[in-house]
Structures are given as C-alpha cells and as structure tokens.
Amino acid sequence: MTRILLGSVVLVTAALQLWPWLRRTRPAAHRWSGRIYVATAVPAGLAALAGSRARWRTRESKL
C-alpha cells in the first residue's frame, strides 16, 4: 500500500516537473514539487524493492 501511495505522488510531481508553464510562471512551485519528488521517490523505490523481495521469498518457499 505504501508503494502505491508514494508512487502516485511521484507520478504527479514528475508531471509537474516536466510542465514548462509551471517552470516559467511559478518557479517556487516547480522547486517545491521537485523537493517532494525526491523525498518520495527514494522511499517509494525502497518499498517496491522490499515488496518484490518479500514476494520472491514467498514464491521460493512454495517450490
């Protein structure tokens, strides 16, 4: 569940980072969305890795 929520935030803030209008007209909002992106991308990636590792271990135990 954590990786889904964090991943959603990452996707939204990534879109904001790539939006040229926001960079030109609202540079402070662009910077804040970048900070939020970085602050959520790392935990989202770690949560995804942890989830995939747990799933792999479950699969191995069934074999």
Image (tube, rainbow, N blue to C red):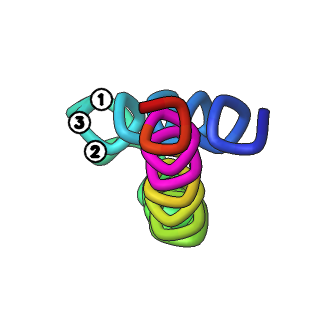
Q: Is mark 1 on a helix, strand or loop?
A: helix
* Residue hosting label 1: 21
Mark 3 / mark 2, whichever is N-terminal? 3
Q: Where is residue 56 in the image (x, y as percent from the top left)?
A: 43, 43
- In the figure, 52 relative to 44: above or below? above
> Which region is colored magenta?
52-59
Kind of residue at badge 3 = Leu
* Residue hosting label 3: 18
Q: Is residue 11 magenta?
A: no
Q: Which of 58 and 52 is in front in this view?
A: 58
Query: In terms of image quadrants, where is residue 17?
Result: top left
Q: Position of residue 25 (x, y in %)?
A: 39, 42
Most prominent secondary structure in the magenta stretch?
A: helix
* Residue hosting label 2: 24
**If the image is split into quadrants, where does the C terminus sit?**
top left
Kind of residue at badge 1 = Trp
Q: Nearer the viewer, residue 60 or 45?
A: 60
For image coordinates 50% across by 48% down, the residue present is: 48
